[in-house]
Amino acid sequence: MSDGTVRSNIKPGLKVSIVLKMDQRTGALTEGVVADILTNSPTHPHGIKVRLADGQVGRVKVIHR
């Protein structure tokens, strides 16, 4: 399991679990495939923000291998 706070670990096409904005309180994870990376900085303490192939946007918590 890789670190979702480091941008270089995340590439379009990877399967990840993200936390959607509306799920930040509960920490509920949503699985999907990365379409776009939205965070420009090399790291982010809460996870790199991505857009999934289905259009949902959230911060990466788990990178599936």
Image (cartoon, rainbow, N blue to C red):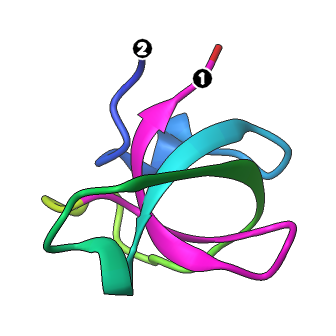
Going by the image, does 26 lie left or right of 19? left
Name which quarter of the figure residue 42 lies in: bottom left
Magenta span main SS: strand
Q: Is residue 56 magenta?
A: yes
Do labels 1 and 2 touch, CB within 8 Å? yes
Number of residues whose C-alpha sits closer than 10 Å to that of mark 1, classed few (under 14), some (14–19) or many (20 or more): few
Looking at the rendering, in which quadrant would you find the N terminus? Answer: top left
Q: Could you tell whether 51 is left or right of 43 in the image?
A: right
Q: Quadrant of residue 24?
A: bottom left
Q: Which mark is residue 47?
A: none
**Who's the residue at 50% across and 43% down the image?**
8
Rendered residue at 45%/76% (across/down): 39
Residue type, mark 1 in image: His
Q: Position of residue 16 (x, y in %)?
A: 60, 41
The numbered disc on residue 64 is: 1
Relative depth, front residue between 4 and 53 = 53
**Vertical order, 41 against 61 (above or below):** below
The mark total stands at 2
Which badge, 1 or 2, is on the more N-terminal residue?
2
Range of magenta residues: 47-64
Task: Name the spot of residue 51 as percent of width and height, x first.
Answer: 67, 75
Compared to residue 65, the image places residue 39 above or below, namely below
Q: Is residue 14 left or right of residue 31?
A: right
Q: Residue at x 60, y 23 (%)?
A: 64
Looking at the rendering, in which quadrant would you find the C terminus?
A: top right
